[in-house]
Image: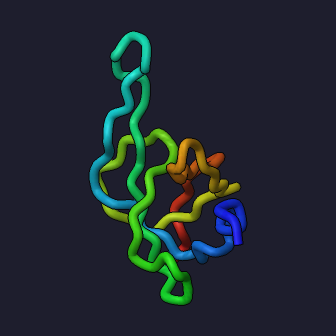
Amino acid sequence: MKLNDFLKPELLGNKFLAVKGYSEVLDRETQKLSAYRLNVSIQDESSDFFMEMIQVKDLKNNKTTPVLLQDLNVGQFNGNLWFSCADVLPANK
């Protein structure tokens, strides 16, 4: 089994929770603020990654709310996993 076998968004499940707060992303060259990363907790109990925290998309949010991650992608670079998505939408309760 290879690392790329785990790079399937469906393995994460489909229940996510946006966590209060965000982290700043600095431009590599200028070291100036270029974006904000949203922290998301995986809440799908059927996922092997249940309760793991991932960082996706730039967004400034001061509330914790269930979210849908549109077009979630998982990749790896230099042994690190990365996550990105086209949009973060509120989940219907």
Closest to the observer, 13 or 86: 13
Instruction: Name the residue located 49 percent from the left edge and 70 percent from the top edge.
Output: 16
Query: Is residue 36 depicted above or below 62 in this figure?
Result: above
Percent position of residue 27, x then y: 42, 20
**Residue lying farthest front?**
1
Closest to the observer, 54 or 57: 54
Percent position of residue 60, x then y: 37, 41
Query: Is residue 32 depicted above or below 55 in this figure?
Result: above
Instruction: Name the residue located 32 percent from the left edge and 45 percent from the top edge.
Output: 22
Instruction: Name the residue located 57 percent from the left edge and 64 percent from the top edge.
Output: 68
Percent position of residue 71, x then y: 70, 55
Percent position of residue 42, x then y: 46, 72
Instruction: Name the residue located 50 percent from the left edge and 64 percent from the top edge.
Output: 67
**Residue lying farthest top?**
30
Q: Is residue 31 rendered to the left or right of residue 7?
A: left
Closest to the observer, 39 or 48: 48
Instruction: Report the quarter where the N terminus lies.
Output: bottom right
Query: Is residue 63 depicted above or below 61 in this figure?
Result: below
Colour pattern = rainbow
Q: Is residue 36 rendered to the left or right of residue 62?
A: right
Closest to the observer, 77 or 93: 77
